Amino acid sequence: MSPGSAPTPLTPAPEREEEVRQSLRAVIDPELGDTIVDLGMVRAITVSGDEVVVDVALTIAACPLRSQIERDVRGQIEALDWVRTLAIRIATMDAAERAAVMARARWKAREDAPETAIPATTRVLAIASGKGGVGKSSVTVNLAVALARRGLTVGILDADIWGFSVPRLLGMEGGVEARQGKMVPLEQKVGEGLVRVLSMGFLADEEQAIMWRGLVLNRAVQQFLQDAHWGDLDYLLIDLPPGTGDVQMGLARLLPRTEMLVVTTPPLAAQKVAARAADMARKGYLRVAGVIENMSDFTCEHGTTYALFGSGGGARLAHGLGVPLIGSIPLHPDLAAAGDAGTPVAAGVGELAPLFAELARVVAEEVAPLLETSSCSARLVERVEAAVASGEHQLD
Ligand SMILES: Nc1ncnc2c1ncn2[C@@H]1O[C@H](COP(=O)(O)OP(=O)(O)OP(=O)(O)O)[C@@H](O)[C@H]1O
Ligand SMILES: [Mg+2]
């Protein structure tokens, strides 16, 4: 607001409450695969002037997603420009509320999600952008490698069926073998961890194509998810093709707990397209976990840093989406060179390796931590009880 101008009058409280409710539809419980509004977890929204109080009820007190949900609620509401103060009150559901939520989650899971070969405990992150060439594939492989260096097992699903680049970036080649009629991802040891990869690039030669003649191209992603031996995975990173296409919608249907990491470059135009990609994800009820800014600035050999494409774009997009900015990756010749050589910078000792290690730390510790099976056990027991009570003995 400029000095002397009249304050913008606030819309009536009920309208602002509705606005808060709508923005909370972007907060998704990835475990239950639905928005916290539709799951009935938002008990009350109270708006008075520019102050907002939100009452959220969690299924269990020790909910492993508590801080994530709280952060997402905060991010979404603080992105509304009229909000000055926000209080989030967290409570725990009673047995009846919990039963209703679990029933809805089970119903949604049954409606929406066909079986995949991805374990229920795997955290699934799709790397998206509205525009091509912003560095999705480079971010995917380097983040995967950096997560693997933490001792984790990380799958990479190259969903860019026509323009696959993951095999080249990782320097992996070869054909995918079949075991019991299912594809076995190619595997590479990285530090204490493992990276497992499926890409059309491993199936592209003619012999393979004949072997996989059942694999219809536009169903390839589905087959990569369903007809493959992924084994135990801590993370599955999905390298999406550019644009806001069918693959994103397909993922929302096949694997609704997929979360999106939106890659953007600083210019405003790129942000708008990136925001559109995030919007689409939300329409399909995918949680947006954060923004990664790539090609943010360039430091020349004399140590001078240039913001070639402007600065602050990633932070603005993150704020607008109400999600954290996970990190900024500079424009660096090593990244391009490593891509051509097939040796990801995150695997090496160069100056970019610590940067990706930090990105992986933020992902693994803050943005999308692994769900601790022990603290989830209460939830699993509930699911078993609910399933048994409803006469269903098949859980997943
Ligand atoms: N931070 C960076 N510094 C220098 N070069 C980079 C950087 N990030 C990516 N590149 C280069 O830019 C090009 C495009 O990157 P990449 O293939 O990862 O983008 P993409 O978003 O996956 O593209 P597409 O939309 O075609 O799938 C590659 O040649 C890559 O080496
Ligand atoms: Mg790519």
Image (spheres, rainbow, N blue to C red):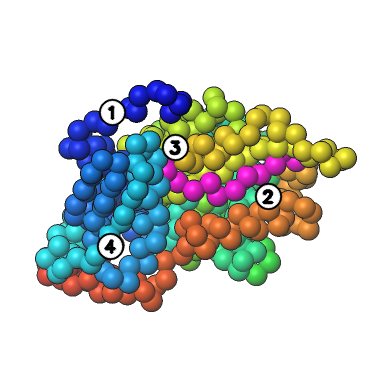
Which mark is in front, 1 or 3? 1
Which mark is in front, 1 or 2? 1
- Identified by mark 2, the residue type is Leu
Q: Is mark 2 within 8 Å of ligand 1?
A: no
Residue 160 x %, y %? 53, 38
Above or below: residue 74 compared with residue 81: below
Determine the image quadrant of residue 131. top right
> Which numbered disc covers residue 9?
1
Q: Residues within 10 Å of mark 3 (few under 14, many from 20)?
A: some
Residue located at (27% from left, 31% from top): 10
Which mark is in front, 4 or 1? 1
Who comes first in sequence, dot 3 or dot 4? Answer: 4
Residue located at (56% from left, 58% from top): 362
The quarter of the picture where the N terminus appears is top left
Tell me if label 1 and label 3 are in contact, CB under 8 Å.
no
Determine the image quadrant of residue 162. top right
The range drawn in magenta is 321-333
Pick the front one: 327 or 335? 327
Circle 3 is placed at which residue position?
320
Residue at mark 1 to residue at mark 2: CA–CA distance? 55 Å
Circle 2 is placed at which residue position?
170
Q: Residue furthest front?
A: 4
Above or below: residue 267 compared with residue 170: above
Residue at mark 2 to residue at mark 3: CA–CA distance? 33 Å
How many labels were placed on the picture?
A: 4
Q: Does the segment drawn in magenta span residue 99? A: no
Where disc 4 sits, the SS reads strand
